[in-house]
Image: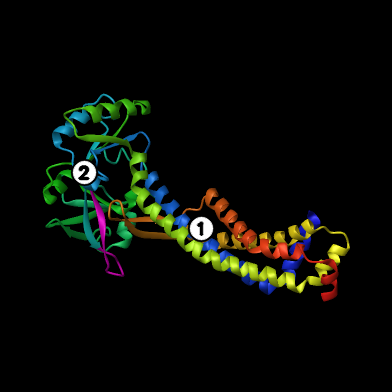
Amino acid sequence: MNLLFFYSLRNLLTRRLTTALTAAGMALVVFVFASIVMLAEGLEKTLVDTGTNDNVVVIRRSSVSEVQSGVERIQASIVETRPEVAIGADGRSLLAKELVVLITLEKRGSNSPANVIIRGISESSMALRPQVKLSAGRLPRPGSSEIIAGRSIAKGFKNVGLGETLSFAMRQWTVVGVFDAGNTGYSSEIWGDVDQFMQAFRRPVYSSLLFRLRKSSDFESLKKNIESDPRLTLEAKRETIYYREQSEMMAKFLRILGQSLTIVFSIGAIVGAMITMYSAVANRTGEIGTLRALGFSRSSILAAFLMESLLLGCIGGFGGLFFASFLQFITVSTTNFQTFSELAFSFKLSFEIVFKAILFSLVMGFIGGILPAFRASRMNIVEALRES
């Protein structure tokens, strides 16, 4: 087996230009496949990391997102008194009543409009999100027209930088701080006092409730009690589950797009590999005859040429992954189909993606090399030596 491996490797090195061009075609296909899957993975990780497992999101029953939800004040008060809600160091419930609405802002540079999430927060909102850190300025004062912006929004949109003034809901809002929420969806939001936002947007109800559980094991009983309470028309979800659901539609679209493009491009790469291997067989007819005369079996010849094609696919696979790995340093911003709001996230490379990409490249090599390998293995010894 080692002899066959080095024989196949030597032949690839001998035909450097052909090998490089064929491997480059496969690398391009793997790059496209990996980059789109990395994009979907990055979207899911960004939204899942936005949530905390011990936090619970309560929204109106059958609402897809907070934007579509409405929680009446009396319902919020009922949930707040639940014994499963954790109590903070100040003796108050660790529960935040929040408002979520969309506004349209212009991007810096391109001036193109995009929807941005405006989140009205209450006193416990920051304590419930330990991943959110104030990176510049200060927090907005309760009862004021002051806001803080996520890092991605402050960087990518007009009039949302520290000290700038933003106009929406027929009021002027001053950006007094910028917060960093890491690679989470909160970095793509603008926060301010919930009561001021409710007045400005003329919204009499909250969008959602967020609270921490006393014990994580209390969730199932809490969910059952909230959803069966006749006074409430609400449903409860763990925050991690809620944000995973927010990514499903967009991630599914990206994966379908990636698979479609990959299938189209892979056909060309497989044909290129097949032509390369048929050419190798034609140019080495005498060599194949000599190997058969020396006692190498048909299966050995088949294995040698097939291994050559698999090595070609492997080179293309690792090459495509190498260039795709640099995409992790890029942050993209697009519209989340679930909430129709702007969301910034990065490409994410995982072991699963590496495994799938290498496996896919080997499949391309196998399909492209199996027919030429069969042709080589079935050559007649006398005829092959005569043509040499």
Dot 1 corresponds to which residue? 34
Q: Which sits in the foreground, 100 or 12?
A: 12
Q: Which sits in the foreground, 3 or 126?
A: 3
Q: Which sits in the foreground, 366 or 187?
A: 366
Q: Is residue 228 left or right of residue 152?
A: left
Dot 2 corresponds to which residue? 69
Percent coordinates x, y for residue 294 in the rendering: 88, 62
Percent coordinates x, y for residue 242 in the rendering: 33, 41
Look at 54% across and 64% down and name the residue there.
Answer: 266
Inspect the magenta stretch and tell me whether residue 267 lies in it: no
User: Marks 1/2: CA distance?
Assistant: 36 Å
Q: Is residue 181 visible?
A: no
Q: Which type of secondary structure does the marked residue at label 2 adopt?
A: loop
Region rendered in magenta:
106-120
Inspect the magenta stretch and tell me whether residue 110 lies in it: yes
Q: Name the kind of residue labelled 2 in the image.
A: Ser
